Image (spheres, rainbow, N blue to C red):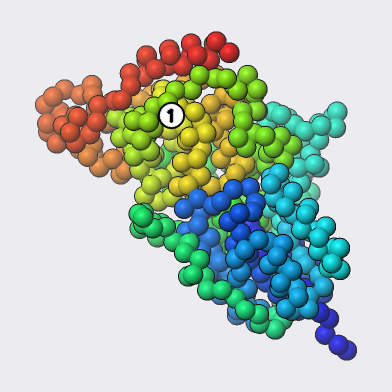
Amino acid sequence: MSTPPPAVVWFRNDLRLRDNPALAAAATRGPIIPLFILDDGGGPRALGAASRWWLGRSLAALASELAALGAPLILRRGPCLQVLRDVAAESGARTAYWNRQYDAASIARDTEIKAALTDEGLDCHTYNGSLLHEPWKVKTSAGGPYRVFTPYWRAVRAMSANLAPAAGVLPAVVGAATLRSERLGSWRLHPCQPDWSAGFGDWRPGEAGAMARLDAFLDDGAADYVHGRDRPGAERTSRLSPHLRFGEISPHRVWAAVQSAVARGDAPEPQAEAFLRELGWREFNHHLLFHFPLIQTNGFNPRFADFAWREDTEGLNAWRGGRTGFPIVDAGMRQLWATGWMHNRVRMIAASFLVKDLMVDWRRGEAWFWDTLLDADLANNVCGWQWVAGCGADAAPYFRVFNPVLQGEKFDPSGDYVRRWVPELARLPNACIHQPWRAESDILAAAGVRLGETYPFPIVDHGEARNRALAAYERL
C-alpha cells in the first residue's frame, strides 16, 4: 500500500500534542508536517515583548517533543499564505489542518488563506482547539450574542454539563520527510534593549509545564480558591493563563481535570465552581471579541467615544515604573515588570488607578499590559481594561473607583505582597504599610523610609482624583 501524501499541521495558539483536534485529525490520515509560521504582519497585532519570550521557549518545548516522535517542527517566517504554499509545494502535501482563531483579523486572514489554498487544490480542515464552545454556538433566547456575563455563564454551564473529557492520549504521529527549517534563535524572540526577562525563570513554558502547573494547583490551591484567589501575597491562583493563551493546555483538559478532582473528593465543589467560572469569563471575553470586533480599539459603550481622557505622561510613566506612591499599585507594576505576570486582583487595582485616579485612556494601559504580560491575550486584555474603565460590556459601574489604600488593607492585610515587591517599605508596620505618608516620622525613620527620596509621595490625592473621575463620568 502506498503512503498517502503528507498533511501540513499549522500550529498557532495551540502549542501542544494532546487534545489538539487539528493534529489528531491529521495524524489519522498519515504522515504530517508540523509547521509554525512567524508572521509579524499578519493576525490581530504583533506580539508584545513578554509574549515573544514565552513563544520562543514554548516552540522549543514543542519542537523537542515532536522530534522525539520523528516529526520535526518546521519553522518559517513570512506571510502565512505564501509559507503554506511553499511548504505544500516542497512536500507534495495536499491537505492542511489548523485550529481556528476568533478575532476579526485572524478570521479574515484564515478565510483568505482557506479560499486560496482550496482553489489551488488543497483540502483545508479547521477545528476548535482553544475554547470550550465556539462563539456562535452560545446564543440568547432571541438567537443573538450575550452582552452580560451572568446569563452567558448560566448558558455555558448548562451546555457544559456533559462536556466530553479532554483527550490526553498522545496521537500516533508519523513524520514526513524533513524540510528546510529556520533556526529558532534567528527569530530573536528574547527581549533586548533592555533584556528585562531575568525574573521569568520561574515559568516553564510548554505542555509539560502546563500540566505541572495544573497538577500543582489541584493539589494545593483549589481547596481554598474562593478566599485565596484574592490574596496576592499567597500563591493560590492557578497561574495557568499563559499556558492557556499559547494553547499548551486546552480549556477542555482543564475543565475535565477539575471535574475529576471534584469527583475524587480532592477539590470541594464550591471552590471548583468558582474556578470554572473564571474559565467561563475567559470564554465570555472571546465571545465578545468575536461578535463585537470593534471593541479591540473602541469602547463597547459608544458614549465613551468622546470621553475626556487626560494626557499625563508623567503619571503614566510613574504607573509603569511602580512609582505612584501607592504601595499596592506599585507592587503590582513591579511584579509585572519582574515576572511578566500580575495577580488578577492587583491588575484591577492598578488598572483602576490609571483610568480613574489619573484618567489616562484605558488603551494606554492595555498597550502596556500587552507588551509586558506573558499571558497577553487580546480578548482578555481588551475586555478586562474596558471592564475597569466602565466602557465595556457588563462593565464595572462607573462609580466603582478602587481605593488603593483600602484595597491593599483588605487583600494584603499583613503587607506580605507589598514587602516582597516594594522592599524599601518592608520594615514598616502593617498599620501604615499601605499608606506610608500617614506614618509618624519616627516610624518612617526606624524603617529607613524617606518619603520623596527612597519612596515617592502619592502622585495624586485619591479623594480628589475620585471626585474628578466621577464628575467626568457623570457628564456622559
The quarter of the picture where residue 169 lies is: bottom right
Q: Amino acid under label 1?
A: Leu
Camera-nearest residue between 22 and 249: 22
Q: Is residue 463 visible?
A: yes
Residue identified by numbered label 1: 354
- Identify the image quadrant of the N terminus: bottom right
Asked if residue 451 is positioned above or below residue 220 in the image, the reply reads above
Asked if residue 294 is positioned above or below residue 275 in the image, the reply reads above
Left or right? Give the position of 358 relative to 151.
Answer: left
How many numbered circles does the render carry?
Answer: 1
Q: Is residue 261 visible?
A: no
Q: Residue furthest bottom?
A: 1
Badge 1, how many Cα within 10 Å: few under 14, some, many 20+?
many
Camera-nearest residue between 244 and 466: 466
The x, y position of residue 386, in whole percent, is 57, 30
Asked if residue 195 is positioned above or below residue 460 in the image, the reply reads below
Secondary structure under the numbered disc 1 in the rendered image: helix
Give the residue drawn at x 48%, y 34%: 364
Give the residue drawn at x 71%, y 72%: 86
The x, y position of residue 154, in whole percent, is 73, 34
The x, y position of residue 57, in whole percent, is 50, 65
